[in-house]
Image (tube, helix red, strand yellow):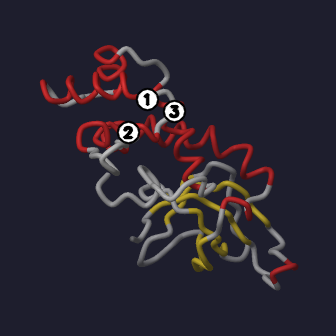
Amino acid sequence: MKEEFAYVLDFFPYGKPEKFIKEPVVHCIGEKYLILLEVTIKPNVKVDLKERIYIGSGKRDKVNRILRRIKYNELSETAKNILEELLLEIVKINEKRFIKIFNISAPITSKKHSLELISGIGKKTLEIILSERAKKPFESYEDLEKRVGVTDIKKAIVKRIIDELQEKDEYKLFVENILI
């Protein structure tokens, strides 16, 4: 699971002395797998919050190296404050990827379906989703909301992603999902 691009959550231009890192550091979230990462930035390079940066293999214009994966509780307050807004943009931009989950998701156990992990989706709404997707796959957020009768599905997805980043339970629907 390798990320090609990431979005800047916070920039530490003087490094992280408490971690003995003297070069500029960025906390970021991967665009595809939504993995939280700590990367170093090349000398004399500036990055902006929410900026999309290349972190893949090959020549990188701003990133020097990927240091490690980090956990949600290691993020600065600045990073935590912009995470929700940034995730909402990622969810909007990648609509087809995220809507795919509603078309292919399966039960986790005999009593719980993976879609029930999303806030606002209970048994009744789940039944409607499964019935509607059997007729025709969902094509967009608008299509899903209209056919199922839910609202603000993008915000519900963002809430679930943050829950997964905070490791609130063992199940992951969006973070590190190789199917989307």
Q: Give coordinates of residue 103: x percent, y percent.
A: 24, 38
Asked if residue 31 is positioned above or below residue 148 in the image, the reply reads below
Task: Report which residue position mark 2 lands on.
Answer: 115
> What whole-number distance in Å separates the C-alpha atoms at marks 3 and 1?
6 Å
Q: Which residue is mark 1?
A: 121
Residue tagged by mark 3?
119
Q: CA distance from mark 2 to mark 1?
A: 7 Å
Q: Residue at x 84, y 72 (%)?
A: 14
Q: Give x and y (percent) for residue 68.
A: 60, 77
Q: Are marks 2 and 3 in contact (CB under 8 Å)?
A: no
User: Label 1 near label 2: C-beta < 8 Å?
Assistant: yes
Mark 3 and mark 1 in contact? Answer it, CB < 8 Å: yes
Q: The disc labelled 2 sits on which kind of residue?
A: Leu
Q: Does residue 55 appear left or right of residue 63 in this picture? A: left
Residue 153 falls in image quadrant: top left
- Residue in the picture at 43% in, 29% down: 121
